[in-house]
Structure formats: structure tokens, C-alpha cells
């Protein structure tokens, strides 16, 4: 077989990296469940027309097709791999509404696929971890406050392993839309899409696009950029936005509604997660199904990585024409997060294998005795493997050392007093003691591999 060619955009971690990823997933799952979110999983494929019905995603969807299409007068419906978990979740809600209890609190951790150019932190195949709260007919605003604070807690729980502090940047679509309409701009979605590019292409280029693509005058473009420049972590930001709107004669009922909501979020966050949530009026989110609060999250000191968690409020994404299921949710780019933790050497696993003990084999004829020890230890939830060969004990110890296994077990060893007993050796310290597989315990910190800050 020829040497395989690496395929960019499809991350594959080494075993110790996988341990880091699994720790992140377990921590997120635990926090979500602490807040009453129930886990679900949806299929990997959706009809193409459903994937394309919201947002600018046509360039990102991977199509699904068979290598050899069979002759048929009824062609298969065109399918695509889901590019996020929100669109399939909306379909899931509609299909199962009669069996679900609302408000529905759901978390979902799955792989998604996007056909975009791979770069640091951006992949074609990656894991997302979502939470959503969905109501039937209505969804009170306080859920728009709760959702980002749950994510702040989940990400904060990872700080013990070395994750940098996070900042959740929040805005409200009603503020933006009320302001844009107040200054005379009707192409609200177009303006939002251009404002969403600010960090990528800068204010001068965005201003130019607002004029050429959205029909804004230069003064209107300047006003949009002035709004986008406002940020703050306390309710003073509300007065600043209102003053700007008043100076342009852009105070509208929709703007005031959005400011009231944004102010409530900032006030609550300042009490429950001081310094974590920041109002940032340039946060727009390019997808057009968001209708209220929008969120983006950055790692402090690693802002160039972009957002590691984003989302917002949506009112019409899930609707069958008769019933509407509004919701609010956020999504963590788990693979992006893990990629930065590993590439920046922020964390490490204490070992790359689960085994805490290697049971040595005296001879192949006595392998059954080693297997019996391993079985007894595993029955008490101690991860164990048996040496692959009955080599000299020195070689078996070296094998354990290469794999990072801290303890080696010697069945039926002869002690200093001449008695025959099992013994276990801590190969890090050299300490070797008599041991009974029915009672011996490794130190708690050695039982399973752990993820710790590096350095």
C-alpha cells in the first residue's frame, strides 16, 4: 500500500489528544445535564432543500450520493450531510412535537460537515456541542438570559484543566434592526451580513460594501459602523446606544424593545458571571434565522482563533405553518476548542492509555494466572492490560514505561522473606510491595488518565 496522503480539515487526534477531547465532552455533558438538558441525536443527513432553506450555506453542504446509481424512474431525494445541528433539530422538533414536553431543553453532541477552506481551528469534519431551549408558541425572554450563562458555566468548568477565560459577546437583533430601519435602511439582512464581516475585512471595506451592496449612503454606513463600535460589560452600554440612536433620529419601538432585553441580559450576567458576558454591538451572526439575542464566544488571549461558541434566539426556524416553536441555543465548536488546547500546549493527559496496571507474564504456560489477576482488578474498576509476551521482567517494565502505565504487577513473586505473593511495583518511584488483587487500590489520581494544565 502506498503511503497515505494527509487529508486536511479532518482532524484525527493521537491517543493522548483523544483523552483531552473526551474530557472536554464529558465535562460539557455533565454541566448540561446539571441544568436539566436531555441528550438527543439526529441523523447525519437531511434533504438538501431543508439544509438550504435558511442562511448562506450552499457552498458548504456536502452532497451524499451512491457511487453507482441504479436505474430508476423515481430518483432518490437529494441528501446532504448536516452542516450544523440547529437545522436538523428544528426538523426533529416538528416531527416529534406530539411526543415532546415543552419547553424542551435539549443538548446534542455530534459531528457535522462543512465544505470550507481548512485553516487553524476550521475543519471540514468536526464535533459540535449544542444546547437549545424550545417553546411551543412562545418562549419567555429569560431563557435568552439563561442559555449563555449555562454555556459560561460549562466552559468555566474547563478552566481547571487550563482552558483560558472566555468572553461571551452578546447583541440583540432587535437593536440592530430597529436602528437600521430608524436611519432608513430596509435591507436589514444584507446590512447584518456585512457587519458580520468586520473582524475579517475591517471597517473600510465593510463601509464600502454597505454602500454598494445594501444601498446605504456614506452617512448611513458611518452610523452603522458607529453602532458596531459600541461595547461594554455593564448596563451603561444601553444609554450609549440610545444616545447614538437619538442623534440620528433612529429611536424606534423595536430598538427600545431590543435595548430592554439586552439590558436585562447584561444585568443578570453581571451578577451570575461577572466579567464573562460583554455587550458588543458588532455581533451580528450571518445566518438569517436569528431574531433576538445573538452570542459569540472568544478565548481571552486567543481572540485570533475566532468564536468557539455562538448562537442566538430564533422564532420561525421550526414551524409547520400552524404551529411555531421558538427557541434559543448556543453551539460550541468542540474540535476548534480541542485543537487550540493541544496546539498551544495548554493541557496534557497524564498518560495516553487508560491502563493503570500492566500484569507481567512469568511464562506463557502461566499466562492464565496473569489473566486471572487482570480479571480481578477490572472487576473493581481498575483498568488493566496483560503484558504481550513473557519477556524478561526488565523488558516488560520498559514496555509499561513506554506506554505510560504507572504500575507493574508480578504474580506469585518471591519476597525478601522467601514467601510467595503477588507484588506490585510503582515504576516511577521504584517502590514494590506485596499486593492482593481483591483489595489493592491504586492512588486515586492514577486510577484513570487525567487532563491537567501543561507546564
Image (cartoon, rainbow, N blue to C red):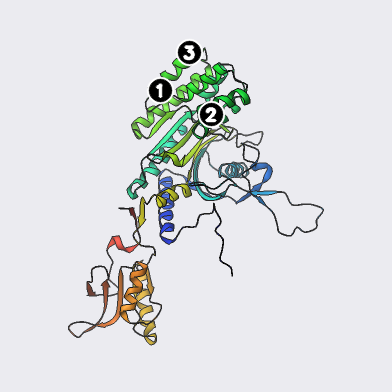
Residue at the far right: name it: 73
Kindly identify the residue that appears in the image at 39 percent across and 85 percent down: 364
Q: Mark 1: which secondary structure?
A: helix
**Label at residue 195:** 2
**Label at residue 246:** 3
Of 89 and 228, nearer the camera is 228
User: In the rendered structure, which disc, 1 or 2, sits on the residue that comes first in sequence?
Assistant: 2
Mark 2 or 3: the one toward you: 2
Q: Position of residue 315 (x, y in %)?
A: 57, 32
Residue at the far bottom: name it: 365
Report which residue position mark 1 lands on.
237
- Left or right: residue 297 versus residue 287 is left
Mark 3, residues whose alpha carbon is within 10 Å: few (<14), some, or many (≥20)?
A: some
Q: CA distance from mark 2 to mark 3?
A: 21 Å
Q: Is residue 373 visible?
A: yes
Up-down relation of residue 346 to residue 449 (above or below) = above
- Left or right: residue 19 versus residue 114 is left
Q: Position of residue 86 (x, y in %)?
A: 56, 42
Mark 1 or 2: the one toward you: 2
Amino acid at each position: 500500500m502506498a503511503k497515505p496522503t494527509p487529508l486536511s480539515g479532518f482532524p484525527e487526534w493521537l491517543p493522548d489528544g483523544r483523552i483531552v477531547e473526551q474530557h472536554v465532552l464529558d465535562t460539557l455533558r455533565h454541566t448540561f445535564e446539571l441544568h436539566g438538558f436531555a441528550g438527543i441525536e439526529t441523523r447525519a443527513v437531511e434533504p438538501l432543500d431543508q439544509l438550504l432553506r435558511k442562511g448562506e450555506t450552499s457552498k458548504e453542504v456536502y452532497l451524499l450520493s451512491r457511487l453507482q446509481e441504479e436505474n430508476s424512474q423515481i430518483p432518490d431525494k437529494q441528501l446532504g450531510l448536516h452542516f450544523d445541528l440547529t437545522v436538523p433539530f428544528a426538523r426533529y422538533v416538528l416531527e416529534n412535537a406530539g411526543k415532546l414536553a415543552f419547553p424542551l431543553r435539549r443538548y446534542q453532541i455530534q459531528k457535522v460537515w462543512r465544505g470550507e477552506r481548512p485553516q487553524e481551528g476550521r475543519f471540514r469534519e468536526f464535533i459540535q456541542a449544542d444546547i437549545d431551549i424550545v417553546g411551543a408558541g412562545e418562549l419567555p425572554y429569560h431563557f435568552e438570559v439563561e442559555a449563555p450563562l449555562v454555556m459560561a458555566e460549562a466552559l468555566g468548568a474547563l478552566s481547571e484543566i487550563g482552558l483560558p477565560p472566555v468572553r461571551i459577546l452578546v447583541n440583540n437583533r432587535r437593536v440592530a434592526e430597529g436602528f437600521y430601519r430608524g436611519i432608513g435602511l430596509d435591507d436589514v439582512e444584507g446590512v447584518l451580513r456585512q457587519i458580520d464581516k468586520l473582524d475579517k475585512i475591517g471597517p473600510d471595506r465593510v463601509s464600502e460594501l454597505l454602500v454598494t451592496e445594501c444601498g446605504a449612503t456614506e452617512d448611513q454606513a458611518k452610523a452603522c459602523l458607529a453602532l458596531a463600535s459600541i461595547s461594554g460589560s455593564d448596563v451603561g452600554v444601553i444609554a450609549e446606544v440610545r444616545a447614538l440612536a437619538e442623534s440620528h433620529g433612529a429611536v424606534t419601538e423595536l430598538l427600545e424593545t431590543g435595548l430592554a432585553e439586552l439590558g436585562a441580559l447584561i444585568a443578570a450576567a453581571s451578577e451570575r458571571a461577572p466579567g464573562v458576558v460583554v455587550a458588543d454591538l458588532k455581533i451580528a451572526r450571518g445566518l438569517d434565522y436569528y431574531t433576538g439575542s445573538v452570542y459569540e464566544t472568544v478565548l481571552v488571549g486567543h481572540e485570533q482563533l475566532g468564536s468557539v461558541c455562538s448562537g442566538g434566539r430564533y422564532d420561525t426556524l421550526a414551524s409547520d405553518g400552524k404551529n411555531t416553536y421558538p427557541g434559543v441555543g448556543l453551539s460550541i465548536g468542540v474540535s476548534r476548542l480541542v485543537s487550540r488546547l493541544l496546539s498551544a500546549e495548554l493541557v496534557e493527559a497524564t498518560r495516553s492509555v487508560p491502563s493503570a496496571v500492566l500484569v507481567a507474564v512469568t511464562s506463557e504456560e502461566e499466562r492464565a494466572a496473569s489473566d486471572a489477576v487482570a480479571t480481578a482488578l477490572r472487576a473493581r474498576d481498575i483498568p488493566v492490560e496483560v503484558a504481550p509476551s513473557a519477556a524478561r521482567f526488565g523488558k516488560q517494565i520498559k514496555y509499561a514505561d513506554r506506554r505510560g502505565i504507572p504500575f507493574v504487577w508480578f504474580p506469585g513473586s518471591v519476597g525478601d522473606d522467601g514467601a510467595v505473593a503477588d507484588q506490585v511495583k510503582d515504576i516511577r518511584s521504584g517502590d514494590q510491595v506485596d499486593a492482593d488483587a481483591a483489595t489493592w487500590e491504586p492512588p486515586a489520581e492514577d486510577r484513570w488518565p487525567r487532563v491537567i494544565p501543561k507546564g
